[in-house]
Amino acid sequence: MSMISHKPPPPCAIVIFGANGDLTKRLIIPALYNLARTGLLPGRLALIGVDHNKKTSEEWAGQIKDFLGTVLAKNNEEIDNGLWEQVSRSMTFLSGDFEKPETYSQLKDLLAELDQSQGLGGNVLFYMAVADRFFPTIAGKLGEAGLMKDDKGFRRLIVEKPFGHDLASAKSLNACLLKYLKEEQIYRIDHFLGKETVQNIMALRFANGLFEPIWNRDRIDHVQITVAESIGVETRGKFYEATGALRDMIPNHLFQLVAMVAMEPPVSFQAEDIRAKKAEMFRAIQPLALTDVVRGQYDAGMVQGEQVPAYRREPNVAPDSNIETYAAMRLKIDNWRWAGVPFYLRTGKRLNIRSSEIAIRFKQAPYALFRDTPVDELDADWLILRIQPDEGIRLRFNAKRPGPAMMLESVSMRFNYKDYFQQAPAVGYETLIYDCLIGDATLFQRADQVEAAWGLVEPVLQGWQNTNPRHFPNYAAGSEGPIAANDLLAKDGRSWRAIRILGGK
Ligand code: BG6
């Protein structure tokens, strides 16, 4: 997230492990293409794909190009051959087994050859676009082959979530990575931080004089963070059975949203300053008790007019599965800014709509002047940061309804991104990949942050594992989640905002 004007990154090679995989085709290549569109690809680039199948470089380039065509067609676009040429220049496929040392010695020779012929300055970005079981192997073998030595140019490694599936596995993954790499060579991607609306939280808080003075327990009553999805587990039943909603979404995506809202202002936008503030914030979160969390699993129901099956009837899901597809929790951050201001988090699949937002509720004004107004007409003020889909910001406050009597109504001021900015086509990975290429780690997670996040949810994971959920399934597909989630807030005298798209101007 460069704070200076953008310029193309230095020459380099990008090596993608998992060159035929979904992530490469759906996100990485389209992101590189979009970077070419904005002039932000390295002027000299070699793109090397590594995967286990046998194919020529021409076949690989042809398949990747065809897939890119289908991605662009969704936006009624066709491939621009000039841009494609910038991406596909020196596209080389290396067929090899990730477990075998010879793959890495061949890769080493190939890199040396391309570095020499293209003048890449020894710079290499490795991208592990593979299942997480390969992370330790690939990182270890790259290290053993001497490929992570950065004495000539930069050597960086991108790791995709999941970074472990509990505290112990996260620690062991970090230990494996750090055996051959320095922390500053590792870029752990959380794709939520690639979203413009998430990056904008820092601009909102720190580039305006208006918000920061009221961003604390004196003025804020509580915060609600919602990441609602209308899709089910689709074809990922096997993955989901081993994961569940909590592991899939909370220690990573939702905690990153919490960090953006709750961290103290950093002294600069340098990666280390921001990461230090986030780490400090994680340390202030109080240990979670089982009474602070709620889990749910969807039953059959109607989602946007379509009848959909229960989770337990999805492909590759056990008919008596106890895996949660919904999780909600109350976090307490015990520091001077946030003591007494709960952060309520919820996320789930097969909810009524896809809608993600951060809603900040301000403290109620004293009632004295409006003693005769019915209490339900006196809503408190809300600042709502819409993450997706109707990206923008809303400020809700009370206004006088026209007429002779002093009647109040909650109204809203709206900023919609699309009204102000023309968005360049993006898949959400452009900024993240660009940042890796220029060596800006601001939007990436450091090992201690990952471990702190897992440490926080660990007691819940253990508690849930040891007790069977009694009423699964406990929410209908197409609803707003289980009733128990309402009770979580009701205990504190609060209630969730309705999950809906705000739309409008
Ligand atoms: C992924 C989860 O990390 O994030 C998925 O594994 C989830 O289960 C997805 O659907 C949500 O991301 P987005 O960008 O579509 O909101």
Image (spheres, grey):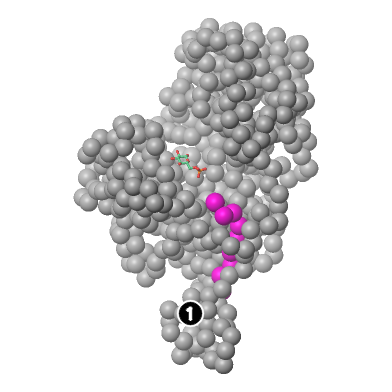
Q: Amino acid at mark 1?
A: Leu
> Who's the residue at 58% across and 19% down the image?
63
Is 179 placed above or below 215 here? above
Q: Quadrant of residue 504?
A: bottom right
In magenta segment, residue 392: yes
Is 117 placed above or below 355 here? above
> Who's the residue at 28% across and 48% down the image?
299
Residue at far bottom of view:
404
Q: What segment carries the magenta color?
A: 388-397
> Who's the residue at 52% across and 32% down the image?
160
Q: Quadrant of residue 480?
A: bottom left
Which quadrant, please, contains the N terminus?
top right
Instruction: Indicate the position of residue 417 as horizontal and vertical percent values.
Output: 65, 55
Instruction: Indicate the position of residue 158 as horizontal and vertical percent values.
Output: 57, 29
Name the secondary structure under disc 1: loop
Instruction: Indicate the position of residue 399 as horizontal and vertical percent values.
Output: 58, 79
Question: Is residue 105 something that shows in the picture?
Answer: yes
Q: Which residue is mark 1?
A: 378
> Who's the residue at 27% across and 39% down the image?
313
Which quadrant, please, contains the C terminus?
bottom right
In magenta segment, residue 247: no
Q: Quadrant of residue 265?
A: bottom right
Q: Residues within 10 Å of mark 1 (few under 14, many from 20)?
A: some
Is 292 placed above or below 184 here? below
